[in-house]
Every structure is written in structure tokens, then in C-alpha cells.
Image: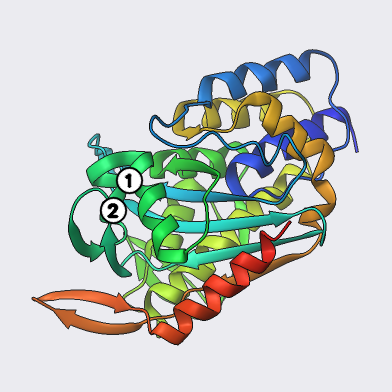
Amino acid sequence: MSPLKKTVLILLGVLVALLVGATAIAGKTYFDVKNTANKVSKPVKGRPEGTNIKDGKPFSVLMLGIDTGEFGRSDVGRSDTLLVATVNPNEKKTTLLSVPRDTRTEIVGHGTVEKVAHAYAYGQEKMALDTVEKLLGIPLDHYVWINMEGFEDLVNAVGGVEVNNKFEFKQDGHTFPKGKNKLNGDQALAYTRMRYEDPNGDYGRQVRQQEVIAAIADQALTFNGVTKYKQILKAIEDNMKTDLEPEEMFKIAMDYRESFKTIDEETLHGNGEMIDGLSYQVIPDEELVRVQTLLKQQLAK
């Protein structure tokens, strides 16, 4: 694998899905990546500074897809997608948990019980971290978010992605036939937004989101030349933020790469309920205990 491909996979993997397989960074590419890493790095005030990555220990990341940027919106937005990754270098395994956006929970710092997706709208990264941390009963060391416009830009930057659609449906003016579909950025965004026609509702949408993320990472491996890697960095620079410092990103890429060879995908399952006229996913106690226990085991020293 060339240094260019490795570098693309480093930043794409760390900031999008933590699927890092790089082993070396060299030359101008290194400085381009570090420059982008500096621009997207944004610490969170009022949160403890984690040292797990620097110490080579297991760590966790809250990954958010923010709906600002969708259809020209410019407000703060809500977390339309929530994923929690726990990365364990000792077990050489990563667990990727999908949290339904409609999960009913306490919004920490806001004094309400409502949809978990609202936490980011009320208090951005800190409130989202505090809320999901309490819900899952584990420390969340870091966050990464991408807005919807950035998701579209990333797909276009890699030249489109291919997905294997389970059934035909329409969304936002696009028709997605059953079987293999080659998607551009606008199509990929629509493909991951649909949930009302899906028999599995929001859970089915989460599967499609994970499918597109994996397809973006796969496309990164096919890159030749400088043009596409610069487009990737531009998409990341304009549309992402994380509290990971550049040194931590590179340490993940160099020292944690074995942790991404095995990725277990999990979903927090709830029951659909109407409460005060709003639709929620209410998580049964036994399901919450199951997921909390699993994540705690993954973060064990």
C-alpha cells in the first residue's frame, strides 16, 4: 500500500469509522494530513481530558451525524445518527454500537427526558457526550461529528460508493432498485435517510448508514494520484470536528491498527411507543444492561 493510500485510510478511518489500517506516513502527504487534523480538532470545555490513547489503553468515541447542512440548513442541528465505538487494543477488537435517534433518555444538563438526538441541539458536544455517557453507563473519551453536507462531500470525494440494497424504495426524488446500486453523494444521503418504508424502521436505516461508511473506507483503498486524497481532506476539513488531537489520531493509526481487524456491530434495541404525542424508542432495562455490560467489558483494562 502506498503512503498516499495509507494516509487517506488513516484520516478517513479515524474521523469517519475508526477503521484504520495505515502503517506509515511520509512526505508532503503527512503535513497535509496534519494540517487538516489541526483544523478539525476542537476540545470540549468542561469535560475531563482523557489519556487512554496516549497510554495505549482501551478508549471510546461518540460519533455523530449532524443534520445541519441538510437541504441548505445552517442551524446547530440534531444528531441524526449516533454511534459509539469502543476500541480495545488488548483484545484487538472494536465494538460499534448504533443508538436509535429516538431513544428516550434523560438529557443531562437540560433537565428533560426526551429523544437522545436533541442533546446535541441543546448543548452541542458536551451535552451529547454527557447524555450518552449516562445512558450507556460508560465513560466517553472522545467525539467525532460530521454534518450531512460533509457526508455527501465525502462520498463524492471518493468517486461514489456501491451498496447492495435489500428492497426497492424511493427517497428524496431518487429510486433505489433492489440489488447493487452505485451512488453519488446526494443519492447516498437519501439512501441513508429513509426509514419509514423500511420494515425495520430506524434500525434498518442504521444498517444502511454503516454500509455506506464501510463503502467509503473500501473506496479509499482504490485511490491513485494526489487529487482524490486532497478532495477527501477538503471534505473532512469543511464538515467535521473532533476533540482528538493530531498526535492522538496518528497514534491510533500506528498503534491501534490491530484493533480494527475485528469489528463487532451492535444495536441498542428499543420498543416503539407514543408518549405525549411523540414517537420514542423505549429501551427495556434488560437490553440496557446487556449493552452496558458489553461496552464495560470492552473498555476493561
Position of 14 compared to 275: left or right? right
Residue 38 % position (x, y) = 58, 19
Which amino acid type is shown beneath numbered disc 1?
Met
Q: Mark yes or no: residue 163 visible.
A: no
Residue 162 lies in quadrant: bottom right
Position of 227 compared to 290: left or right? right
Q: Secondary structure at mark 1?
A: helix
Residue 228 lies in quadrant: top right
Which amino acid type is shown beneath numbered disc 2?
Val
Residue 296 or 129: which is nearer the viewer? 296
Looking at the image, which residue is at 17% across and 81% down?
274
Residue 255 or 207: which is nearer the viewer? 255
Residue 178 % position (x, y) = 54, 77
- Check the picture and name the quadrant holding the N terminus: top right
Residue 202 or 142: which is nearer the viewer? 142
Position of 104 compared to 135: left or right? left
Q: Are marks 1 and 2 in contact (CB under 8 Å)?
A: yes
Looking at the image, which residue is at 44% across and 69% down?
205
Residue 285 % position (x, y) = 40, 83
The residue most toward the right is 1
- Check the picture and name the quadrant holding the C terminus: bottom right
Q: Secondary structure at mark 2?
A: loop
**Alpha-carbon span between mark 1 and mark 2:** 6 Å
Q: Mark yes or no: residue 252 visible.
A: yes
Name the residue that disc number 2 marks: 108
- Sequence order check, earlier mark of 1 and 2: 2
User: What colour-coding does the image apply?
Assistant: rainbow
Residue 260 % position (x, y) = 77, 55
Name the residue that disc number 1 marks: 127
Residue 174 lies in quadrant: bottom left
Looking at the image, which residue is at 67% across and 41% down?
52
